[in-house]
Amino acid sequence: MSSRHLLSIEDLDRSGIERILARAASFAEVSGREIKKLPTLRGRRVLNLFYENSTRTRSSFEIAAKTLSADVTNFNVSGSSVEKGESLKDTVQTLSAYDPAAIVIRHPHAGAAALVANWTPAAVVNAGDGKHEHPTQALLDVFTLTRRIGALDGKRIWIVGDVEHSRVARSNVLAFTRMGAHVTVCGPPTLIPRGIEALGCDVRFTLDELRDADVVYALRMQNERMKDAYLPSLREYVATYQINGRRLGPRQVLMHPGPVNRGVELSGDVVDSPQAVISAQVEAGVVVRMAVLYELLAGARTPSPQPAHRVLA
Amino acid sequence: MSASRLSSMPARPAELVIRGAHVLDPNAGVDAPHDVVVRGGEIAELTAPGAAPVPAGAEVLDGEGRHLLPGFVDPHVHLRTPGQEHKEDLETGTRAAAAGGYCAIVAMPNTDPVLDSGPLLRALRDQAAREARVPVGFMPAITVGLRGAVLTEMAELRAEGAVGFTDDGKPVVEAGMLRKAMRYQKLVGGVLALHEEDPSLSGAGVMHEGEVSARLGLAGIPSTSESTMVARDAALALAEGARTHFQHLSARESVEALAAAKAAGAPVSGEASPHHLLMTDEDVLTLDTRRKMNPPLRTEADRQAIVAALRDGTIECIATDHAPHAHDEKDVPFEAAPMGTTGLETAFAAVYTGLVKPGVLALELVVERLTAGARLMGLPTPRIAPGEPANLCLVDLEVEWQVGESGYESRSASSCFAGRTLSGRVLLTIAAGAVAYRERSFAVSAA
């Protein structure tokens, strides 16, 4: 990686993505061994700083870091000083005093990871910033997909659902197009942001041409969207946009970032179908995050110990 | 009497001669080098360069190669007093105004508490009479607490010196409420200044809705949030004959609505802010919170429409919407940051650099638009003519300076122009007859 941080897919070009994926492929062998541990990051600290609940992403990062022998600490916001009104900057500066090699941050606001990178000497990994980006998800999706169907050049990928509120959609449009795929986003017009074409994708409001897709990537539909009146009803969403056995062709690959709402964006039968690579995505999450941590940290030197004039109180 | 609607601290009347500056005042019809003699705080005479006699005790300033302009008037400033003095107060805000060449400003009521009662206005004007470096006028709220439900006691407020009325920061959401204010205006006078935004359209938006917001994953504020309200309220203003002023217009569609309303004979006017004249949503790509303001920076087409409207007079004046915030408040993720940029100390140089130097707008027109706020608010227009109170600013158009992280008179350093190099520096400001600002490097010249 050119940068010290992984903040956005925008910071990566195709070769940068390929380097991470190649590294991930080499780690995939390790996962097959009985003793799943590499000494690479022994003695380095990785802090998971999560301002939103995310069991999956957080544990995936935790397993990745531990597999590389890093010492991992999870900071969850609930019950912490953040709830006492501490600012993000103060929290990050406090945690930086623990001298972490990396901070993995998820935050409800766009650009939070980039700000944190300004405030800490640690390498920063964006584990989701608002509705902006989720770069490691995009990387693991590219990894999963290339293992399944080979190079993405010329492949047609449809991303279906609530694009408006999806950081996964943004990062994946960028990553898939950088790898040579042709991306179409599809969903209810109220949930497709105006101007999204600027990311380099096409826009459709119906699934009429879904049969053209090589890959169908369904997004999670959240119940709050009904409450906020983006949609008339979940029933109408299901009728119009659900990926089900009737709509999914036998040669199409089905992806989903999880957790799945069975019976909403996906019917139960397609979740369990051989076209679905959803559990392969989860598996890829660990090796891709190992690769990211490796690329950011393994080359970088551990900061030399501070001189012993620190006051110990 | 309108002059009494402005308050400032007592100051020694200026006694000075400015030699040889190029005097440019479109309101007074002056555009040539002159000596200008200020005696007892009044403009005593304009003479040929080098010809003015120096009255005893008068200071002589070298204006050669510089421009002497009428002091600017800003109809839209947030002085954050009372209640938010950690952002700005009457002294720092009016010092910032003086440093920007302003000889009068009008303060908005979205303070804590909201300026919505006669006693509070009286107290604030008393405070301004002790602390304000340049004259300040106050615009109390249209509705109590800016809540849009009950009219303020406008008659009492006018008697206490209210310039006009505004719920700025918020729209008057209910058309029926605004119509009542417009009808009541017939009793009390004073312009109604409107922040136009339909909250059901702006929602949780934090920037302009478009390609950049889509890319950043930020909730957008569509242009229609502003333009539909301009159209609605212009129709009300026409029907009620109510003098109405549209604040900080940002969208092309709003300009079109304003032009249509004027063509129909509505007594409406509009203002544009330097950031909307000079920046677009592309400038938000870095998520610099100093560029988060409401209304938001919009597209290049919108920017050009605002510039064109300022040129043709559809938009009559430049207003800074100076909205200071503390550093810590802005040093947070974009979505969490408060809306607003400072503007008083950069307005002239930013507009001069971005629009006059490249030949988009004439300097004369910009000077007129920087002073027109006075007329629109019912305040006296500063004029460089014998017998007028001295309201002047001396600028050096050649001086280049970098908008920095510090070095402001304002308590806030949150300028959307930070990092840019600007041309044009205010060297001296005389407001209401007294020297209100003198640039540090601007030495007193020998007589």
Image (cartoon, grey):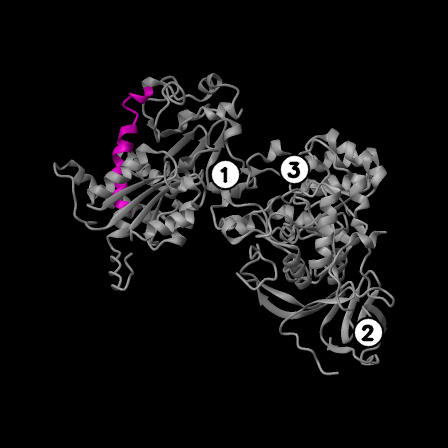
Q: Is residue A23 above or below residue B130?
A: above
Nearer-N-terminus badge (2/3): 2
Q: Secondary structure at mark 2?
A: strand
At 65% from the left and 37% from the top, the residue drawn is: B197
Q: Residues within 10 Å of mark 1 (few under 14, many from 20)?
A: some
Q: Is residue B423 above or below residue B290?
A: below
Q: Secondary structure at mark 1?
A: helix
Q: Are marks 2 and 1 on the same chain?
A: no
Magenta range is A270-292
Q: Are marks 3 and 1 on the same chain?
A: no
| Marks 2 and 3 close (CB-CB < 8 Å) | no
| Marks 3 and 1 close (CB-CB < 8 Å) | no
At 75% from the left and 66% from the top, the residue drawn is: B11
The amino acid sitting under disc 2 is: Val
For mark 2, what is the residue? B37
Residue A197 tag number: 1
- Farthest residue, direction left: A34
Question: What x and y, as percent, mark residue A93?
Answer: 37, 52
Question: What x and y, as percent, mark residue B369?
Answer: 75, 55
